[in-house]
Amino acid sequence: MAPALKLITWLLAVLISGLVIPLATAGDGDHDLARRALEAGEILPLRTIIERVEYDYPGQIIEVELERDDDLWIYEIELLRSTGALLKLKIDAGNGTLLGIKGRDLERTISPEHEH
């Protein structure tokens, strides 16, 4: 391998490792916060939320985020319906209440037998 190519490869490896380590560290802090909130009873387990969402909104969950907005923990869930519609749900992580929903074909999102 030519010396210039070795140098470029080494610089890329250093740059990439420098970016990856801070991202992993930031994620660990978020995970610890979520675990502590669950252990303190501030949020419902993600499994409980997912079961409710899958029952009311059949489709494939493609992303879940847990965020804290002031004193409220919120699960933000993106769901792909079988129709191709993308739904974005905001759910109170403390009690499972649906706070908001965005997406197409909202009038057809809950089948009549699932309505509460």
Image (tube, rainbow, N blue to C red):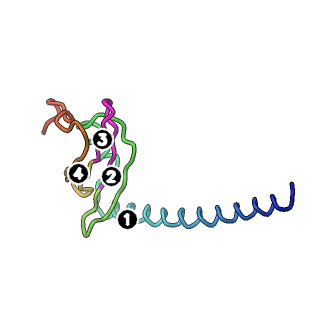
- Determine whether 91 is above or below 54 in the image: below
* First of labels 3, 2 by sequence position: 2
* First of labels 3, 1 by sequence position: 1
Q: Quadrant of the C terminus?
A: top left
Q: Which residues are magenta?
A: 75-88
Magenta span: predominant SS is strand
Q: Which residue is mark 1?
A: 36
Q: Which mark is residue 51?
A: 3
* First of labels 4, 2 by sequence position: 2
Residue 94 x, y percent position in the rendering: 24, 58
Q: Secondary structure at mark 4?
A: loop
Q: Quadrant of the N terminus?
A: bottom right
Neighbours of disc 3 within 10 Å: few (<14), some (14-19), many (20+): few
Q: Which mark is residue 96?
A: 4
- Determine whether 32 is above or below 90 in the image: below
Neighbours of disc 1 within 10 Å: few (<14), some (14-19), many (20+): few
The residue drawn where x is 31% and y is 65% is: 68
* First of labels 1, 2 by sequence position: 1
Q: Which residue is mark 2?
A: 45
